[in-house]
C-alpha cells in the first residue's frame, strides 16, 4: 500500500512538473472551447446581406447562431464601436466617442492596473496568463483601441490579403484568442456607396476570406474546440454612416463552432455583448465595469 501511494505521489509530482515546464494551463470554458477566432469586417451592414452571395457566412449561419440585428452604439462610427466591442461597455464608460478616437474623448469611468479601461485581451490574459493572443488589422485606427501589453502578436498591414495571410499564420500557431480585422467593405462604401454593385462585390470578397480562415482552422487541427465569431461595427447608406438609423446601426453577428446551438438569435444583442461573450467562452470573469452580457442563448451549455 505504501509503495502504491508513493508511486501515485511521484506520478502526480511528475505531471505537475511537466505542466509547469510547458506553461500548460487549463481553460475553464463552459463549452469546452480552447480557441476563439474573432473576424471583424468594417462597414459590413446587415441591410445589405444576401446569404446566397455569401456562401461561407451562410455556412456559419446555417450551422451556428446568428442575428442581423446586433445594434451599434451612437454615433454609428468605427473607433467608438470597435472599442465598445473590445471593452464590453458603452462609450459613456470607455470614453471613446468619435470616428477616429486615438485616446478616450472623455475620462474612462474606470481605469485598471494597466492604465486603461479593461479590454477583452487584458481580461483573457488575467484569466489565462499563458494564453496566446494576437491581432492583425488593416486600419491603423484599430491599433489605438486595445491593450498592447496583453498581446503576444500585434500587426498593422495595409492590404486585405496581408490581413488574411497574417491571420492564417496566427491560426497555425493555435492561439487562445485572435482578432482578425478587415477594413473592407468600409473603404468601398465610402468610395462607391453602400449597396452599390462594387460594395456588394466586396462583401463577397470578405466572405471568401472568411472561407479561407475556416479552412485554415481545420488545417490547424483546432476546429473541434474553436469558436468563431463574425461581426462589424456599422452599416451605412450612400457614401456615409454615423446616423441614428437602422441601416447604419444594424450589423450581422454570427457565432460558429464548439458548443454553439444552431439557430437565429432572438435575444437583444448590442456591441458591448461581444467582449462579454468571448470572455464567457474562455471561462474568464468579466470586470465589474463592463455592461455587456454573454449571448448564452447561442450555446448548448449554459
Image (cartoon, helix red, strand yellow):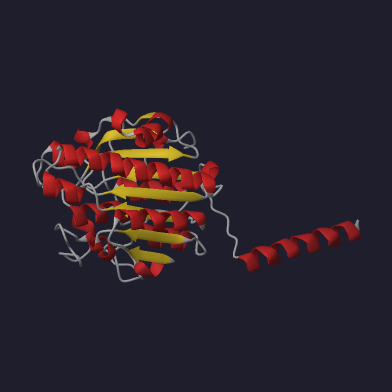
Q: Position of residue 81 (x, y in %)?
A: 22, 52
Residue at x 43%, y 58% (from the top left corner): 124
Image-based side of 71 in relation to 180, left or right: left
Which of 72 and 296 lies nearest the eye of the viewer? 72
Q: Is residue 301 visible?
A: yes
Image-based side of 27 in relation to 122, left or right: right
Image-based side of 260 in relation to 145, left or right: right
Relative to 302, is 128 above or below? Answer: below
Quadrant where the N terminus lies? bottom right
Q: Position of residue 158 (x, y in %)?
A: 27, 61
Q: Position of residue 15 (x, y in %)?
A: 72, 61
Which of 240 and 291 lies nearest the eye of the viewer? 240
Which of 136 and 302 lies nearest the eye of the viewer? 136
Residue at x 45%, y 63% (from the top left corner): 126
Which of 7 and 239 lies nearest the eye of the viewer? 239
Q: Position of residue 282 (x, y in %)?
A: 47, 50
Q: Quadrant of residue 44?
A: top left
Relative to 166, is 47 above or below? Answer: above
Q: Is residue 88 visible?
A: no
Q: Quadrant of residue 13?
A: bottom right
Residue at x 85%, y 62% (from the top left corner): 6
Tally of numbered discs: 0
Residue at x 47%, y 43% (from the top left corner): 215
Relative to 24, is 252 above or below? Answer: above
Amino acid at each position: 500500500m505504501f509503495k502504491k501511494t508513493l508511486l501515485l505521489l511521484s506520478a502526480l509530482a511528475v505531471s505537475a512538473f511537466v505542466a509547469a515546464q510547458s506553461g500548460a494551463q487549463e481553460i475553464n470554458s463552459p463549452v469546452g472551447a480552447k480557441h476563439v477566432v474573432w473576424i471583424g469586417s468594417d462597414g459590413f451592414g446587415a441591410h445589405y446581406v444576401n446569404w446566397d452571395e455569401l456562401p461561407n457566412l451562410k455556412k456559419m449561419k446555417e450551422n451556428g447562431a446568428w442575428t442581423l440585428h446586433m445594434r451599434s452604439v451612437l454615433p454609428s462610427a468605427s473607433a467608438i464601436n470597435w472599442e465598445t466591442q473590445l471593452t464590453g461597455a458603452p462609450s459613456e464608460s470607455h470614453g471613446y466617442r468619435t470616428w477616429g478616437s486615438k485616446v478616450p474623448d472623455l475620462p474612462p469611468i474606470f481605469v485598471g492596473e494597466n492604465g486603461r479601461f479593461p479590454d477583452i485581451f487584458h481580461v483573457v490574459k488575467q484569466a489565462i496568463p499563458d494564453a496566446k493572443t494576437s491581432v492583425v488589422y488593416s486600419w491603423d485606427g484599430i491599433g489605438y483601441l486595445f491593450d498592447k501589453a496583453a498581446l503576444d502578436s500585434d500587426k498593422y498591414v495595409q492590404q486585405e490579403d496581408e490581413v488574411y495571410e497574417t491571420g492564417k499564420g496566427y491560426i497555425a500557431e493555435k492561439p487562445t484568442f485572435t482578432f482578425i480585422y478587415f477594413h473592407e467593405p468600409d473603404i468601398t462604401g465610402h468610395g462607391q456607396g453602400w449597396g452599390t454593385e462594387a460594395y456588394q462585390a466586396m462583401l463577397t470578397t470578405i466572405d471568401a476570406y472568411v472561407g479561407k480562415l475556416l479552412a485554415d482552422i481545420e488545417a490547424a487541427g483546432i476546429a473541434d474546440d474553436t469558436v468563431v465569431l463574425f461581426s462589424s461595427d456599422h452599416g451605412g447608406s450612400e457614401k456615409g454612416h454615423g446616423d441614428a438609423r437602422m441601416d447604419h446601426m444594424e450589423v450581422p453577428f454570427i457565432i460558429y463552432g464548439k458548443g454553439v446551438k444552431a439557430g437565429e438569435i432572438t435575444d437583444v444583442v448590442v456591441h458591448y455583448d461581444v467582449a462579454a461573450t468571448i470572455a464567457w467562452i474562455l471561462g474568464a470573469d468579466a470586470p465589474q465595469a463592463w455592461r455587456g452580457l454573454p449571448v448564452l442563448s447561442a450555446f448548448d451549455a449554459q
